[in-house]
């Protein structure tokens, strides 16, 4: 089936001028972003840079999933959320900020905990899934669903000064369970804000 043709407006051409000018990206790259629908699992430390940069880049639809509320201890790294947002649902706080960053992007939000049972329906219709989570049960659920649907899966994780980002293409690369066969055991995860920002930015770049 032929891809839908996207007509870029004068607004689009000016707004995205700097990335359209990147060698190998061009107008067709921008059209492909506009057609794309991506899922960001998590609206926290990794989800912040991922969703902000994909929104700013003009991805057509961003689906954000997170059941948590904003806490004071989130604010060193989760820059979509501010002091005034403490106690709000993270998805509501994220939706408000992302719509201000780029009102032309369609942002969908889901107040759900990701499980093996609902992961297939949550990823339905998307072109890419970004793992911005902090727990492996949900990561493994998305990993399995993406393998079954053959949807690219972009994993990221942080701990202290360290972080990792891995792009998983079903049928071409190792899956997340191949790389991390069992969930690491840890309590509260220590993290520096810039580390989460760096890893999330790498994930957004890989998606684009």
Image (tube, rainbow, N blue to C red):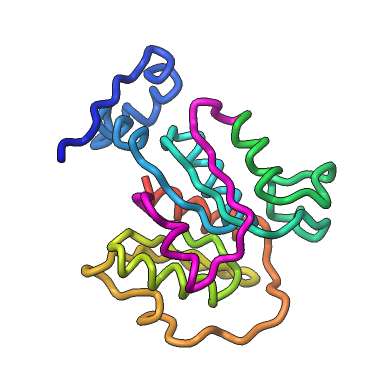
Report the side of 158 relative to 182 (left or right): right
Query: Up-down: is 2 above or below 7?
Result: below
Which of these two is toward me, 171 or 112? 112
Question: At x 69% / y 55%, what residue is drawn?
Answer: 77
- The residue drawn where x is 30% and y is 30% is 31
Which quarter shows the C terminus?
Answer: top left
Q: Is residue 112 magenta?
A: yes
Q: Quadrant of the N terminus?
A: top left
58 vs 147, left or right, is: right
Task: Give the percent coordinates (x, y) of residue 162.
Answer: 57, 70
Q: Is residue 87 magenta?
A: no
The span picked out in magenta is: 101-129
Q: Nearer the viewer, residue 19 or 93?
A: 93
Relative to 85, is 124 on the left or the right?
Answer: left
In the displayed orientation, state which residue is furthest to the top: 10
Q: What percent of the width, then of the height, locates residue 64?
A: 55, 50
Q: Residue at x 38, y 62 (%)?
A: 153
Q: From the viewer's perspective, is residue 197 above or below residue 26?
A: below
- Residue occupying image coordinates x 54% and y 76%: 136
Taking 116 as reference, is 132 above or below it?
above
Where does the image place residue 178, in percent across and percent down from the top left? 35, 82
Residue 161 at what x, y percent from top left?
Answer: 62, 69
The total of numbered circles placed on residues is 0
Task: Tell which residue pokes out farthest to the left in this image.
Answer: 1
Q: Quadrant of residue 165?
A: bottom left
Residue 25 sits in quarter = top left
Give the quarter of the image for residue 203: bottom left
């Amino acid at each position: 089936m032929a891809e839908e043709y996207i007509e870029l407006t004068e607004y689009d051409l000016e707004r995205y001028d700097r990335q359209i000018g990147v060698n190998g990206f061009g107008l067709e790259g921008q059209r492909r972003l506009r057609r794309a629908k991506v899922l960001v699992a998590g609206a926290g430390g990794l989800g912040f840079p991922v969703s902000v940069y994909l929104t700013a880049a003009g991805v057509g639809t961003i689906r954000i999933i997170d059941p948590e509320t904003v806490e004071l201890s989130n604010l060193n790294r989760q820059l979509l959320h501010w002091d005034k947002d403490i106690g709000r649902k993270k998805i509501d706080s994220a939706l408000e900020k992302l719509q201000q960053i780029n009102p032309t992007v369609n942002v969908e939000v889901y107040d759900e905990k990701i499980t093996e049972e609902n992961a297939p329906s949550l990823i339905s219709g998307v072109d890419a899934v970004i793992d911005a989570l902090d727990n492996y049960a949900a990561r493994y659920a998305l990993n399995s669903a993406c393998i079954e649907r053959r949807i690219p899966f972009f994993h990221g994780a942080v701990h202290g000064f360290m972080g990792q980002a891995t792009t998983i293409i079903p049928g071409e690369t190792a899956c997340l369970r191949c790389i991390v066969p069992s969930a690491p055991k840890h309590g509260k995860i220590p993290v520096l804000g810039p580390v989460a920002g760096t890893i999330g930015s790498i994930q957004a770049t890989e998606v684009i």
